[in-house]
Image (spheres, grey):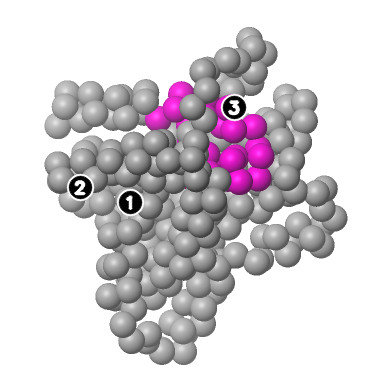
Amino acid sequence: MSGQLALLVLCAGLGAALQTRIGPRLRTAVWDGFFWFVSPVLVLHTFLTVHVDRGFLLAVAAAALGAWAAAGLAYLYARLVAGSRDERAALALGGGFGNTGFVGIPLAQLAFGHPGVALAVLYDRLAYLVPASSVTVAVARTHGLRSPVLAPAARLRALLLNPPLAAAAAAVVLRLAGIGVPGLGAASSAAALVVGPAGFLLLGLSVPLERFEHGSGELRRAAGALAVRFAGGPLCLLAAGLALGAHVPAAFYLLAGMPSAFHLLVLARVYDVRPRLMRLLVVGSTLPAVAGVAVASLVLR
C-alpha cells in the first residue's frame, strides 16, 4: 500500500514538473488514452461481471436517481448564480460530480474495510448508469470557451460520441446475448493498474500552478456549489432510497458526498472551463473530505 501511494505521489509530482514544458500536449495525450481506451475496458468488464438481484437493482436505482438529482440540483444552482457559461459549467461540474474513484475507493476502504471497496467500485461505475466521464465531457464541450455554442442536436452528438458510453451499451447487449469477451479480465486488470498512476499524472499536469486569487463573490458561489456536493448528494440519495423502498448501503452515502472529481481539472484545462475556479472547487473539497473521513474512521472504528 505504501509503495502504491508513493507511486501516485510521484506521478502527480512528475505531472506538475512537466506542466510548463510539455504540459498541454502530454495532458491531451494521457487524457485521450484514458478516455478512449482505459475507461471503456473497465466499464465493459464491470457491466459484464456484476451480480444482479432485486436488492442490487433497487440500490443502484436509488443511487442513480440520487446522483442525477444532485447533478441537476448543481446545474440549477449554477444557472441561477453564474455570470457566464464557462463559470456555469465549472460550478455545475464541481457541485454535481464527485471523486468516487481515485478518492472514493480508498476512503470507502478506510471507513468500511474491504467490503467498502467492492461497494465503492459498484457505485463509481453504476451511479449514473452511464459513465460519469461521458456526461462531464459533454458539459465541458458544450460550455467551455474553446468550444462553440452548440445547437441541441450537436450537444446530443457530444454526449453520445463517448467510448465509455459505447462500452456500457455494448456490455448490455453482450450480456443479454450471453456472449463473453476473451481476454477481457486480463485487459481489465492491466487497465486497473494504469488508472491510478495515469489519473495522478493528469492531476499534476492539470492543477493550475498560479496563486489562489478569487474575489469574494466567486468564493461565495464556489461555497454554494460545494454545499451541493457534500450535502446535496447524500440527501438526494436518501430521498431516492426512501421513495424506492431500497436498502442503500452506508458506503453509497459516503460516495454520494465525495469531493469534486480530479478529472474535472483536466476538462477545465482542455476545454477552458475556468481552470482556477475548478482548482478551488477540487482542492477546497478534497482536503477537508480526506481529513474528515480519516479522523472519523479513527474515532468510530
Q: Can residue 184 be seen in this view?
A: yes
Q: State which region is magenta.
A: 260-286
Estimate the x, y position of residue 248 in percent, counting from the top left.
37, 48
Q: Which mark is residue 196?
A: 1
Q: Do the residues labelled 3 and 2 touch (CB within 8 Å)?
A: no
Foreground: 4 or 185?
4
Residue 19 placement, left or right of 145: left
Element marked by disc 1: helix
Residue type for callout 1? Gly
The residue sitting at 33% across, 51% down in the picture is 196
Q: Do the residues labelled 1 and 2 touch (CB within 8 Å)?
A: yes
- How far apart in space, not on screen, are marks 3 and 2 (Cα)? 30 Å
Secondary structure mostly seen in magenta is helix
Estimate the x, y position of residue 94 in percent, counting from the top left.
56, 35
Estimate the x, y position of residue 19 in percent, counting from the top left.
47, 39
- How far apart in space, not on screen, are marks 1 and 3 (Cα)? 24 Å
Residue type for callout 3? Leu
Identify the residue position indicated by label 3 in the image: 277
